[in-house]
Every structure is written in structure tokens, then in C-alpha cells.
Amino acid sequence: MSTETENPPADAKPEVATPKPAAKKPEETPIELPAFEKSISDKIVEKFGDKVEVGFVKEDRVRINVGRENVHDVAEFIRDELNYDHVESVSGVDYPQDNEIEVVYHLGSYSDSSLARQILVLATRAQRETNPIPGNDATKLPTLRDVFYSVEFHEREVFEMFGVFFEGHPDNRRLLLPEDWADLPPLRKDFAIKGR
Amino acid sequence: MTFTLPPGLALQKVDERIMTLNVGPQHPGSGHMRIIVQIDGDYIVACDPDPGYVHRGEEKMAEYRNYITNIPHLERPVIHDSCNVLYPYVLGAEEILGIEVPERAKYVRVIASELNRCIYIMYWLAIYGIFLGHSTMFMWPAGDRELLIDLMEKMTGARVTHAHFVPGGVRNDLPPNFEDVCLRQVNYFEKRIKEYAAVFYDNPILISRTRDTGVLSRQDAIKYGTTGSVLRASGVDYDLRVKEPYDVYDELDVHTNVMKEGDSYARSRIPWLDMMESCNIIRQALQKMPKSGSVRTKLKPNPKGKGLNSVYKRVESGRGSLGCYIVSDGKTEPYRVKLSVPSFRNLIALPNLLRGEKLGNMPSVYWSLNYWPVEADR
Amino acid sequence: MLKDLVTPENANVFIGKLGDILEKAIDKPLGYAINWGRIWSLWPVHIETACCSVEFGAASSPRYDVERFGIIEAFGSLRQCDLVVVQGTITRKMAPRLRLVYDQMPEPKYVIAMGACAITGGLYFDSYNVLPGIDGVIPVDVYVPGCPPRPETLIQGCILLQEKIKRMKARKFV
């Protein structure tokens, strides 16, 4: 069970210099994780164990990193047991140095009022191809459209902007780009815009 | 020389019974998008929205500019709601750069964002009126809107594109005597919009055109992940100003307007009620605002983020919850900026609402979704 | 002879040609009158392309009321319009549509490029999906700078266009 937290460096510095006299109270607070958010991440870790990794637990934000083979199960668990019911945004982030494309789902809840402030960040990674052929290469992820209906247009956008094909999505067509777009998916890091 | 049409423009076969119609992009009732509808007689069988006519690649451009120079182009998606569309980006940038905001700046931001919300809703109301064939409802809001634009012009110096919010506060302090002028204008404005009930909201023609058209049930509103007035018209009590208060909204008394019907009428009435709520908030904020003090924390010329860090901030804009996901890798430019815009989130409701409706009801359903195509395309 | 020339099938074409011939004939004496007629019928196509449409809408509001000049009147069909106001950014997806709209309009037709994006690409000069100005798509008569231009600027642009039409040859489009 690995619960690492991503503390900003500003908080980490006073932790090293413990014997300083005045700032004793503020140094304890960042170490203590917010209780409610911790309970959410604990539930997921309890169920899936090593398959998930807790990215961070901040106030109102919990981040869970999942491998692509488990993302569907984790999403189903989050919907059924934790009462998250819709997706606010689906963003792709390109990491060429890791040879991976990260797809981040921001989940929220309308029906459970205790979760109204919370955003659960579900991140998964797909393999990245240097010469992408969108739809016909290894950059694939299982779709979450049957779990969260609201991802439909968001996943279409990620498909055209990053070339991540969502297997099982009923409608993997182009959405925003022109019909005759034949270049790289534009939000990849190796697609350079003119003059830059 | 041969010229071939792009695939989307090619002529389509006309079935004997089902006919395909392109509504837009050159169409008085569509705005900057195309809606491909299939009609059987007068009834819509299927609908396929085709956005992207104003896709300008803002997210890609944001990766090449630093945190300050990103401001002008990130407010362009909704220029008549420019304070609100910039708000989550500024909040996120503040967290990444580690800046504190002075107390007075927070109040100035709240006032600016509420004024901008009213300006947005008035424009939307004017458009909604003219596309339902109600010309008075174009003229009245379009004229009254100028009052608030004058206020914003006084405050920020520009008519619609203010670029007023910056990481660390707002660009300028309020002009002298602004509080009195603002209070007077807002009071007059509230009196004016209350008159709209007689000409628009109690108008039997409007009611007959919008009641029971495009009904979105509570379950569906949650399932589609809709937001803002669309969600609140379906009976879900969710407003980020109450649920996740940012800046000083937790010190102000905000009331959420909820209606249960979920039809076009409820969706068009909620923004109107929101404007009155905004007037209340502005009055409270003017009262509680510190009378003097700094409005901006000075920044270094090229501020840098700290390490690999990501934030997701959201605010309640004129159309609903607007989120901004910023990933920083410790450089002067953000690694990735993603705007999660309410128009794009509400778009998924459109095909489901239009199925089974009459073609003539399309404008009343489409514009009641509070959809602004430029924002959805980014 | 005229009977052989004009059949019911080509009557429309013939009458259209007759109009052209007449216009040529009366250009000198009546050119001013023809231009005068064109000045006061500048009706725009209803095509919004980007965010400048907000200020375009504000120009019709009671405060600015552009219709008092007899121009920019909201109108439905592009077959009866003779003005394209390109309201902002033209993306690569919109450009073929804009050209289609322009080609479908009958002569005479005029183009106003409204906003920095329509003139040079403006703020989006380095975007991958935005054209650097619309000059490459359709010919432009008047440029109205601003981001977005204020409604007064748009009105001034329209009046400049009127001045330009006044000085044009009425036969230019025949």
C-alpha cells in the first residue's frame, strides 16, 4: 500500500529544519492529510491493492493512477460504491520522454451532497507511438462511456487531439478539427505550431 | 483544375422518408456550429451536432506562452463573459506560482465576475428572444446590457475583453467613486429586468413555445453531466458559489435558484433569476469590501511553477461550472492547459433532447442550453 | 427574329442579359443612381464566424442602432444579401464554408473584415487551425480593426464602404 503525497517544496523545507523555534504549528498541518479525502482513497486502495497508486491527497482533490487494464473496473467501483456520477473533463497529457500519453478523468458527483466539493482525478496511461496512425496503432484505451455516459464527446476530443483510440466507444469520429486534417494529432508535443 | 469538396460538404443521398438537413453554419438560428438533423416529416429522428468551426487551438497556444501572456487569449472563448472564463485559470496559476491575493482584490474580482455574468446572460437573453421571433426581447436586454458594460468599462478600460484578472489580484484598482455609481446602476438594472416578466416570461406565446419542449429529467441531467442553468432547471441544487466557494463567496450569502420542470421554459427562466441573485451579491460585496488597500501582489517578470504539479480549479460561470486543469513542469510556460467548458459539457444533451421533437422547436431547445459555440470549440 | 431567339426555356436568361445591356447603356447617366441604390441596401449575410459577433449584435442594440443608417439589417437568405461581414477568426474548417457562402451570393457583393483575426489572424497568428487573414479566401473591401472592434468602429467601417461604393463604377460587376 503506497500512499505517497506530492507535497509542494515550500512545505517540505520546514520539515527538514525541525528544530526551528517559531513555526511549529504550520509544519504539522501539511503532513496530516485531510480526513475525508483520505477515506476515499483508502476505500479504493483497500479494494484494488497494488493495482492502483494514490497520486496525491489534497483538500477536495484525490488523484488515483491506474494501469490501462484496470481502469474500467476502478471506474465502475467509483461509480457504484463511491457515488461519483459524472465526468467533468477528460484531458490528455503527452509525455514523450516516458513514451506515454496520460488520460485524466476528473470525476464529480451531483447526487451525493457530501461529495459536492470533491473531484476525483482518475489517471491512466496509454502507450505512445512516434509515428501515430490514429485508430490503427497501439495507442489504445478501454472506453469509460458505458460507465459514465458523459465522457462521450470528451473522449472523441481526446481521440482527435492525441490519437488515443477508445476501444468500445460507439462513435469515434472527428469532432473539432477540419474534416481534411491529415497531420499529427495537434496537442502532441512533437506537433510544433508555426514560428515556435 | 479540379476542386473536390471536403467530405463533410459532399451532397448526401435523400432517403424517401427520412431527410437530412444541415442547420448551420450559415443559418440565422444556429450560431457558429452545424447541427445535422434527420427529419421524418416534421419530427426530428436523429441529431448530430458538428462543432469545431471556431476551434482555434487555444490549449496548444497556451503551452508556448508564459503564465501572464496566456491571459488575453484564454479569455477570448467567451468575450462577453471574459472575467469568468479567465477566473479558473487565474486561480490555478496562483496555486502553481504560490501567490497570495489581497483581500480587496478578491472582492473586486467577485464584483467583476458577477457583473460579467449579468452581461453574458443579457446577451444570451437577447439572442434567445430574437430566435424565438420576439424582437422586443432582443432590444430590451441588448440596450440594458450597455449599462453594465459602461460599469465594466469604467472599471477595466475595455468594453468586453477586459483581461482584468491576473495571478495575484486584478490589474487596476477601482476608479474613484465607483461604489456609488455601481450601486445606482445595479439597482436600476434590477428594476429593469423585473419588467421582463411581463413582456417575456409571462407571455403566453413564449410559454406555449417552450413549455414541455425538450424535457430533461433529473436522472438524465446527472447522467449527461450537464451543468449550470441546464442542471439547475432539472432540479439539481448545485452551484459552485455555494458548494465549493472560491475567493470570498463563502462570506457572501448566495441563494441557488432551482426549478423542477426541466423543460426549455425552466432553462430560460433560471438565468433570469440568476441575474437578480447577482445583483444581490454585488450589493453585499460592495458593502463588505475593504475600502482601501492593495489589489495586486507584484510578480517577478517571468514567474515559474514549482516542480511537476497539477491543479484543477473550477468556478461557476454564466453557463455553469468551468474548470481549468493546469499541469506545470517547473518552467515559465505551463506544460498543459485544459479548459473544461460548460458549453462543451452541455452539448451532449442536445441530441438526446432533440430526438422526437418537432423541427420548429429546435431553436427554443438549442438556445435554452445556454450554448456558446466559440467556448465549446476553444 | 426575336421570336426565334427567345423561347420559353431561355426567357429568363434573355431577360437577365437584357438587364445587363440596359445597365451598360445607362451607366453614364444613371451610374450615380445605381450606386445610390446599392449604398442603402447593404444587408449582411447571417454568418457568424467567431467572437466578434457579440459586438456585431451590440451594433444593432438600441444604443448604437446601426439600422438608422439603413445598413446592416438582420436578414435571412443569402440570395438577397450583398454584404459579408466576416466577424472574426476564420478557421480551416470554416474557410470553405465562407467561400461557398460568398460564391452563392449574387453580384454586387462587398466584404468587410471585422476584427484583428479576420485581418491578419490577430491573437491567433501562430495557431495551427486559424487562417492568417481572410484575404486569401475572399476579396476584402474594408478592414475594421480592433479586438473586438467597438460598434462605433463597425459603423464607421460601413460608412467607409458606402463612400467606396459611391466612387465605384456602377458597371464594375457586369
Image (cartoon, coloured by chain):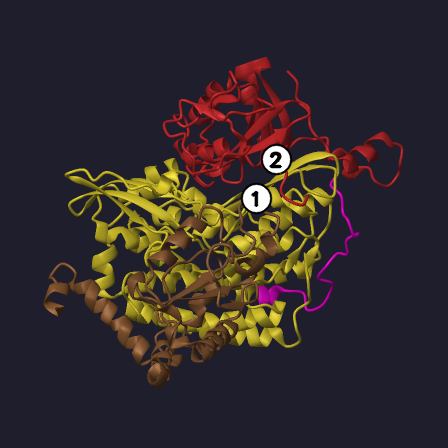
Chain colours: A red, B yellow, C brown
Residue at coordinates 18% horizontally, 37% vertically from top-left? B15
Secondary structure of residue under mark 2: loop
Camera-side residue: C27 or C84?
A: C27
Does residue B298 appear to the left or right of C113 in the view shown? right
Q: Is residue C98 above or below residue B145?
A: above
Q: Could you tell me if residue B187 is visible in this image?
A: yes
Cβ–Cβ below 8 Å for labels 2 and 1?
yes
Which stretch did the figure color magenta? B285-305
- Quadrant of residue B103 in the image? bottom right
Residue B238 visible (yes or no): no
Residue on which disc 2 sits: A191
Q: From the image, which quarter does the N terminus of chain B lie in?
A: top left
Closer to the camera in the image, C6 or B67: C6
Q: Is residue B328 above or below residue C143?
A: above
Q: Is residue A35 left or right of residue B296?
A: left
| Majority secondary structure of magenta residues | loop
Image quadrant assignment for residue C27: bottom left
Judge whether B324 appears above or below B247 on screen: above
The residue to which callout 1 is attached is: C128
Residue drawn at (60%, 72%) of the image: B154
Q: Secondary structure at mark 1?
A: loop
Look at label 1 and name its amino acid.
Tyr
Binning the other alpha carbons within 10 Å of mark 1 as few (below 14), some (14 to 19) or many (20 upward) gives: many
Residue B293 colored in magenta in the image = yes
Q: Residues within 10 Å of mark 2 (few under 14, many from 20)?
A: few
Cα separation between marks 2 and 1 = 10 Å
Instruction: Find out whether residue C120 is within the magenta segment.
Output: no
The residue drawn where x is 77% and y is 56% is B298
Question: Most extreme residue toward the front, as rendered?
Answer: C1
Write down the chain letter for disc 2: A
Q: Amino acid at mark 2?
A: Phe
